Amino acid sequence: MAIPESLGILMTIVINIPFGYWRKKTKRFSKEWFLAIHSVVPIVFLLRFLSNTPITHIPIFFVAFFTGQFIGGRIHILTGFLSGEFG
């Protein structure tokens, strides 16, 4: 069952958003922080494998991974500002 590479990249971003949100709520370099970043790696590997992506395209998935983490962290910051938590 092969999925298109573009769908794999998009799914990588979307799957990482809640983990980026969780990462932003944890103390940096704590066990929870480490899990928020690394627990999704097997899922991203599976997406890359299912999309039959050549090894030369791994950097694209790497960027997509951290884009999702970044977006999730930004959502956490924005929701904190909107709720008055940060000011």
Image (cartoon, rainbow, N blue to C red):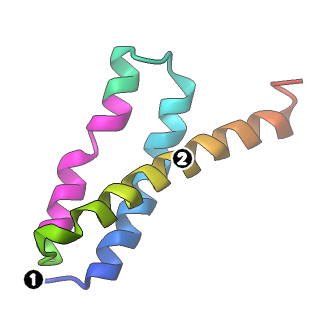
Callout 1 secondary element? loop
Q: Is residue 16 left or right of residue 85?
A: left
Q: Find residue 24 and report its horizontal and vertical position in percent.
A: 55, 31
Q: Which mark is residue 1?
A: 1
Seen from the viewer's position, the closer of residues 54 and 18 is 54
Residue for point 12% across, 68% down:
55
- In the image, residue 30 sits, relative to residue 9, either above or below, namely above
Measure the alpha-carbon separation of dots 1 and 2.
Answer: 30 Å
Q: Percent x, y for residue 10?
A: 40, 71
- Say whether marks 1 and 2 touch (CB < 8 Å): no
Asked where in the image residue 6 lies, by quadrant, the reply is bottom left
As displayed, is residue 5 above or below residue 39? Answer: below
Asked which secondary structure carries label 2, the reply is helix
Q: Quadrant of the C terminus?
A: top right
Say what amino acid the circle numbered 2 marks.
Phe
Q: Is residue 43 magenta?
A: yes
Quadrant of residue 85 within the rendered picture = top right
Q: Which residues are magenta?
A: 35-49
Please give the residue where the numbered disc 2 appears in the rendered image.
Answer: 70
Residue depicted at 85% across the width and 40% down the height: 82
- Identify the image quadrant of residue 60: bottom left
Foreground: disc 1 or disc 2? 2
Q: Is residue 81 magenta?
A: no
If you read the primary sequence from the N terminus, does the residue marked by circle 1 or circle 2 appear first? Answer: 1
